[in-house]
Image (cartoon, grey):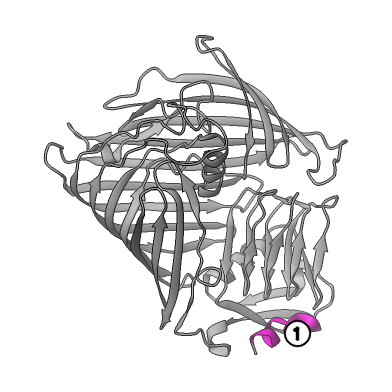
Amino acid sequence: MRRALLLLATALPAYVGAQDLVVDGTHRSADVIRAALAKPHIVRSGSGKLELPRDSTISTTLIVVGRPTYLASKVNGDVVVIGSDLFLRPGADISGRAVAIGGTVSLTTLGHVQGGTESFRDETYMSSVANGTTTLTYQRVSLVDPVPLLQPAGIQGLLIPSYDRVDGLSLPIGALITVSGVEIEPRLTYRSRLGVVDPGVEVRTSSDRDVRFEGRAGRDTRSNDKWIYSDLVNSLTTFWNGSDTRNYYRSSVGEGRVFFHIARPGMVLEPFVGGRYERASSISGTGDIFTVRSRTDTEHTKRPNPAVEPGDISSLLAGAMFNDTAGVVISRARLELEGSASTMAGTSQFVQLTFDGRVAFPTFGTQKLRFRGHGVATTGDAVPRARYAYIGGSGTLPVADLMEFGGGQLAYLESLYLIPVDAVILPVVGSPVVTVRHIIGGAGIKSLPKLEQTIGAGLGLSVLHFDVDTDVARSRGTKFSFGISLGS
């Protein structure tokens, strides 16, 4: 029955003009569709799969109704697939968001989505045509094809693994229990270097509600440096070169957040409040994991892991997430304020503000300017080291040592100018991209030190890039690097 719903769009023509499509519903997914309709856009619909090849460019937002979409092209806007799946292929370059409603966004490591991805798997839309206007009416998939009470999480119970210098291979398996719109996901994570199995559970309510909850509890290896690289990129760089861009500590943690959804065409604001309780302890970093290179390097794989004070921290949380794809300027940001209620012996109460943001917009032709910023500000006489953040080396300040600077105060800003060489189109990787960048940043315990500045240039081929960077003061020399980038 579910598949029949997804094929209802076969009655639509292959192209629907902007004025011919309306949405009936007040859910988050309806807001996403309306936001796409508010921009210059095209609508494609039908029953067969839609293939958009690498050498094609779509100059506006793309809305697809009822068709599995295989996208390898460049899209100057959002991509919203309704009633089916969106498969991103090598070469995909989307300046806005990639969204699947009634399906899933399948990612590729050889593509870029500036505005992020989202999948509304439990929602779809039925279509009807009257007086030349097509109306999409909201329908929960579970009302047609009931969600099983118990099913494997991820792919047959296997969740996304990761690899780092303190846990080695982290291999999670889990199940998914769904009761009255509430998802409960218990999991067990085997950590090869530690030889332990960590229990955990995540609880979340349906994402289509104006008020939703996300919470988790369990034993974990935590880091305050996940903003630098995604889990996938950090795992790959660790395995290949031992360049783990994170410091870690062990934690038994329970935390939850209540989100309030506020949407306008092309913009989503989600304020939240919550709390966290954790018991922190140190974890060693002795380099006894496999890496292809730098296996015995004390600056990489064998880099000592900073110790933290053992004990409990309880705190209140507040903040907001923001995503704007309404115009040519694409931006997203997250702000979180943590205020401690209690801390371990030898440390003081603290208040910590953490900001992470991205902004991108076109300049001339296909050229783009991107900014990436991260900041941490902390008050307190003796802040727990479990709240320190670190910076330096790959992913932040290229000419500095890996994670050289750290503390309760951190500032980082990267400006990146991208110049695609459109006249050259290479097989598989597409057009080369010349980049020019400036980076400024630093971190300290109670105050910021003099900030480091780096200038550089690079050449990118899809997610592969070659960079040359030097510090402005010319005291650290020049660094040549080759790596991968899966977007931010």
At 54% from the left edge and 13% from the top edge, which residue is drawn?
472
**Of the pair 221 and 325, the residue shown nearer to us:** 221
At 42% from the left edge and 32% from the top edge, which residue is drawn?
302
277 in magenta: no
Residue 38 location, quadrant? bottom right
Residue 436 lies, in percent from the top left, at: 66, 26
Residue 7 location, quadrant? bottom right
**Of the pair 57 and 69, the residue shown nearer to us:** 69
Residue 391 lies, in percent from the top left, at: 43, 30
At 75% from the left edge and 60% from the top edge, which residue is drawn?
41
Residue 381 lies, in percent from the top left, at: 17, 31
Q: Which three-letter amino acid code belongs to the residue tagged 1?
A: Val
* Category of crowding for the residue at label 1, using alpha-carbon neighbours closer than 10 angstroms: few (below 14), some (14–19), many (at least 20): few
* The C terminus, quarter of image: top right
Magenta segment boundaries in residue numbering: 2-10
Tag 1 secondary structure: strand
Residue matched to label 1: 129
Residue 108 location, quadrant? bottom right
Taking 420 as reference, is 250 left or right?
left
Residue 8 lies, in percent from the top left, at: 73, 84
Vertical order, 25 against 89 (above or below):
below
**Of the pair 40 and 298, the residue shown nearer to us:** 298
* The N terminus, quarter of image: bottom right
3 in magenta: yes
Magenta portion: prevailing SS class: helix
**Of the pair 9 and 404, the residue shown nearer to us:** 404
At 51% from the left edge and 13% from the top edge, which residue is drawn?
476
